[in-house]
Image (cartoon, rainbow, N blue to C red):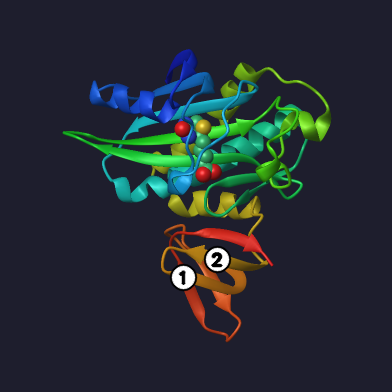
Amino acid sequence: MFKLYNFKTLSSTNDKAKYFADKGQNNLVVIAEKQEKGRGRFGRKWSSESGGLYMTILLKEENLENIKYLTFIAAVSVAKAIKKISKLNSKVKWPNDVMVNDKKICGILTETVSRNEKYALIGIGVNINQKKFSKNIANKATSLKIETNKNYNIKNISRKIMKEFNSLYNYYNKKNYNKIINIWKKYSHTLGKSIKVKTLSGSYIGKAVDIDENCNLILRLNNGRIKKIVEGDIFVV
Ligand code: BTN
């Protein structure tokens, strides 16, 4: 169902997927062995040396409002694939990360293209065979290699992720968004924790109590009030 495009080096797999979207193509996956300008949310750099998996899924979309469910599907797909391949338990951290032993092993950057048609680009970066990370992220990031002391076949992992993605994407196509939220919650690293959330409009401290039907994080503030968080970064306190 998805056509695969493999590259040695790209600036960013999301950019290449945009190029394909501009040409009216979709239902494809772009994979690169390394990226020269890998990026994360809020314009951050995504370390993209060889040894990691860098892939972007390109889908034509009718309603770009719904793409947050695609981020959730991608995160759960990565968690399931990691379990199958390495037996490691991984958890999904709101809104777009996958964690192993409280360290980030995968980040997801979902972007959109609106021309005559609309497209979603789900960019997935998974740390696989990296032996270590630069000082500034070393205490926050991990890889399958660091966790298990084994090397993995990166192509094989991308295939496993796509298999899981395909199966969860059926719920998306049937607009069964509740099912997606409920599966995500089963893998949640976030719910039940006392956290600090940094949003573009300010910071909030409280307990992560739920995810609503639109993938927003529901926070119970220390004064008892409920706050809906639509975007931001969370930190366990
Ligand atoms: C984040 O944690 O902020 C998201 C990181 C997303 C990284 C992936 S790697 C493949 C795709 N191409 C990019 O440039 N970014 C995403």
Assess disc 2: are there few (<14), some (14-19) or many (≥20) residues with their C-alpha within 10 Å of its C-alpha: many
| CB of mark 1 near ligand 1 (< 8 Å) | no
Residue 129, x across and y down, in percent: 71, 24
Q: What is the number of the mark on residue 202? A: 1
For the N terminus, the image quarter is top left
- Residue at the far front in the pictured view: 135
Q: In the image, is residue 108 above or below residue 222?
A: above
88 or 32, nearer to the observer: 32
SS under mark 1: strand
Q: Is residue 83 visible?
A: yes
88 or 100, nearer to the observer: 100
Q: Comparing marks 1 and 2, which lies closer to the viewer?
A: 1
Callout 1–callout 2 Cβ contact below 8 Å: no
Q: What is the number of the mark on residue 162? A: none
| CB of mark 2 near ligand 1 (< 8 Å) | no
- Residue placed under numbered mark 2 in the picture: 197
Q: Which residue is located at x 28 percent, y 26 percent?
A: 21
Assess disc 1: are there few (<14), some (14-19) or many (≥20) residues with their C-alpha within 10 Å of its C-alpha: few
Q: In the image, is residue 194 above or below residue 160?
A: below
For the C terminus, the image quarter is bottom right
Residue 140, x across and y down, in percent: 69, 47
- Residue at the far right in the pictured view: 149
Mark nearer the N terminus (1 vs 2): 2
Whole-number angstrom distance, CA of label 1 to CA of label 2:
8 Å
Relative to 223, is 66 on the left or the right? left
Tell me the kind of residue under disc 2: Val
Q: Which residue is located at x 53 percent, y 47 percent?
A: 96
Q: Which residue is located at x 47 percent, y 64 percent?
A: 199
Q: Is residue 167 visible?
A: no
Q: Residue 56: name its quadrant.
A: top left
Residue 196, x across and y down, in percent: 60, 68
Residue 37, x across and y down, in percent: 46, 29
